[in-house]
Image (cartoon, rainbow, N blue to C red):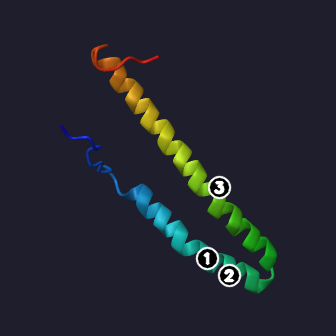
Amino acid sequence: MIDHAPLEIPASPRPYQIAVLVRQVLPPLVAFAVGRGWLANDSATLVAALAAILLPIADGQWRSLRRSRALARLGAIVPDSVAVVR
């Protein structure tokens, strides 16, 4: 019996590409704004720190919600001897 999840392959690479684009473009834009004086260096550091803390938390919560919904859908399909949705 296999006790691990199957490999999940996204149908579209667009969400990953957008995330990579934002991750690569944002630092030069922030550096440009700080260099022009539009944004204080302390403010940029604070925003970056908050994003580094909050984005992984939000992503984890979103993935947990999607996994829970998928398990609930599966539990509704399989017999009660296999799984019961409460």
Q: Position of residue 42 (x, y in %)?
A: 80, 75
State yes or no: discs 1 and 3 in contact (Cβ < 8 Å). Answer: no
Q: Is residue 50 above or below residue 37?
A: above
User: Could you tell me which quadrant the N terminus lies in?
Assistant: top left
The furthest residue to the left: 1
Q: Which residue is mark 1?
A: 27
In this rendering, is residue 60 above or below 48?
above
Question: What residue would you read off at disc 3?
Answer: 54
Q: Amino acid at mark 2?
A: Ala
**Mark 2 Cα shell of 10 Å, populated few (<14), some (14-19), many (≥20):** some
Instruction: Residue under label 2, please give it.
Output: 31
Q: Is residue 69 visible?
A: yes
Secondary-structure class at tag 2: helix
Q: The disc labelled 1 sits on which kind of residue?
A: Pro
Are the two marked residues, 2 and 3, in contact with CB atoms closer than 8 angstroms?
A: no
Q: Gap in Å between the C-alphas at discs 2 and 3?
A: 21 Å
Give residue 52's position: percent from left, percent from top: 63, 63
N-terminal of the pair, mark 1 or mark 3, is: 1
Up the image or down, 19 lies above or below 84; here it is below
Residue 53 sits above or below residue 60 on the image: below
* Distance between mark 1 and mark 3 Cα atoms: 17 Å
- Quarter-wise, where is residue 3 in the image? top left
Q: Amino acid at mark 3?
A: Leu
- The local secondary structure at tag 3 comes to helix
Of badges 2 and 3, nearer the viewer stands: 3
Kindly identify which numbered label has been placed on residue 45. none
The one of 25 and 83 positioned closer to us in this rendering: 83
Image quadrant assignment for residue 26: bottom right
Pick whichever of labels 2 and 3 is earlier in the sequence: 2
Q: Residue at x 47, y 67 (%)?
A: 20
Contact? badges 1 and 2 (CB < 8 Å): yes
Secondary structure under badge 1? helix
